[in-house]
């Protein structure tokens, strides 16, 4: 897009010429509370003036880490009571894969087609199609890919499988929700063969789908949960979360089974804590997601729209071809509205605004989108 950003405020970004843009993508779902949310800014400034890097994993107890982990676990099922902080979602994926191999003693991994879990070599091995990874082969061996929502793929989960890694809602394929029965069948199959279920909520978490975590809507609890993006409130922060007994596998043979220098940085954890506190104290923020989703869907009616797939304040508006998508994005940008497409779906517009967006802002944004689509 070539925008030079000079500032941000709420759902708006401001360029160096002073033009304001309503941000419908929120840094790919990162700015769940919008740009420069006062609680997050104050927490970052306070922590930066107290101390920054010390020893993240070592002999020190760091208050921001402890407070964030405590609050996070208070809002998770009892079986998810141990948090390993990372710098990013990719690193959360890598740590979870290592943990699953260590716990099970197996090497096989199953992921879904059109999944995206990160770009480092291990996480990229989970990606299919291979367009974005073929130039870097060979990657991690022993990875199989099932079709999302296809019962036939359950046979790929075998006694040689260490873990099944799935997005609770597929993001880069253009917002594809699982059938509840299918996700529950995956959970049962993992239990049958002794594999771990890893659910990636790097984009789906932090209220995006209308509950704090998307898995709450499906009657399934993962063995390992992946978080990032909105989790840090605009600062780089990720985590993989598991039960204490599972996580203990990283403490022996070798004693430092997984280490990081900057994962769980105190300033990032302070920002994450302020974000989670705000989301859990202001019940209306997440409670209003469903009605805002409905408003988008009600207003976005146009002959060029072939489909709208949504999961809360997160949707894909399918128009048909990439040329049309590019035209609409360019026209929106001219009018002060930012949208985008998806990694594996160039036919759909990405909508994932800050959860703080108002009804009036939604109405204005939809008007611009419809105008940009033309006759």
Image (cartoon, rainbow, N blue to C red):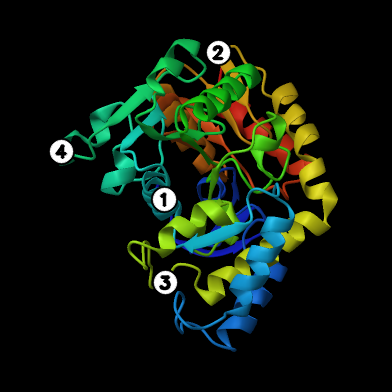
- Asked where in the image residue 245 lies, by quadrant, the reply is bottom right
Q: Is mark 3 on a helix, strand or loop?
A: loop
Distance of mark 4 from mark 1, alpha carbons?
22 Å
Q: Is residue 13 visible to us here?
A: no
Give whichever of discs 4 and 2 has the lower sequence position: 4
- Circle 4 residue: 138
Say if mark 3 contacts mark 4, CB within 8 Å.
no
**Category of crowding for the residue at label 3, using alpha-carbon neighbours closer than 10 angstroms: few (below 14), some (14–19), many (at least 20):** some
Q: Given this view, does label 1 or label 3 mark the residue nearer the observer?
A: 1
User: Distance of mark 4 from mark 2, alpha carbons?
Assistant: 38 Å
Among the 4 quarters of the image, the one containing residue 222: top right
x and y percentages locating residue 132 in the rendered image? 26, 35
Alpha carbon distance from label 1 to label 3: 19 Å
Checking the image for residue 262, the label placed there is 3
Instruction: Give left or right: position of 146 versus 291.
Output: left
Rendered image quadrant of residue 63: bottom right
Q: Where is residue 361 in the image (x, y as percent from the top left)?
A: 73, 43
Vertically, is 34 above or below 349? below
Residue that mark 1 sits on: 99
Q: Which of marks 2 and 3 is in front?
A: 3
């Amino acid at each position: 897009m070539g925008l030079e950003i000079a500032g941000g405020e709420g759902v708006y970004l401001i360029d160096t010429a002073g033009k304001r843009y309503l941000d419908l993508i929120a840094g790919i779902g990162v700015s769940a509370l919008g740009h420069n949310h006062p609680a997050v800014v104050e927490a970052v400034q306070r922590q930066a003036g107290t101390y920054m890097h010390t020893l993240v994993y070592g002999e020190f107890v760091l208050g921001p880490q402890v407070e964030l982990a405590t609050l996070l676990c208070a809002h998770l099922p009892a079986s998810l009571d141990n948090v390993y902080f990372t710098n990013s979602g990719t690193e959360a994926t890598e740590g979870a894969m290592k943990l699953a191999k260590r716990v099970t003693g197996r090497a096989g991994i199953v992921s879904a087609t059109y999944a995206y879990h990160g770009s480092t070599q291990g996480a990229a091995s989970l990606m299919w199609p291979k367009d974005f990874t073929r130039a870097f082969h060979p990657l991690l061996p022993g990875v199989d890919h099932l079709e999302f929502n296809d019962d036939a793929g359950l046979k790929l989960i075998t006694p040689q499988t260490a873990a099944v890694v799935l997005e609770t809602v597929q993001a880069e394929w253009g917002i594809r929700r699982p059938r509840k029965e299918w996700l529950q069948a995956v959970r049962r199959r993992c239990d049958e063969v002794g594999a771990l279920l890893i659910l990636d909520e790097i984009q789906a978490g932090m209220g995006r789908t209308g509950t704090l975590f998307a898995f709450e809507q499906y009657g399934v609890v993962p063995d390992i949960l992946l978080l990032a993006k909105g989790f840090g409130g605009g600062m780089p922060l990720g985590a993989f979360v598991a039960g204490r007994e599972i996580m203990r596998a990283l403490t022996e043979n070798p004693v430092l089974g997984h280490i990081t220098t900057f994962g769980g940085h105190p300033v990032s954890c302070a920002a994450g804590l302020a974000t989670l506190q705000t989301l859990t104290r202001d019940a209306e923020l997440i409670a209003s997601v469903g009605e805002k989703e409905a408003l988008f869907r009600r207003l976005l009616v146009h002959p060029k729209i072939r489909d709208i797939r949504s999961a809360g304040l997160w949707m894909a508006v399918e128009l048909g071809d990439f040329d049309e998508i590019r035209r609409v994005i360019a026209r929106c940008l001219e009018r002060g509205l930012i949208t985008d497409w998806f990694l594996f779906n160039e036919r759909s517009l990405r909508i994932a605004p800050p959860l703080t967006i108002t009804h009036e802002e939604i109405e204005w944004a939809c008007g611009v989108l419809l105008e940009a689509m033309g006759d």
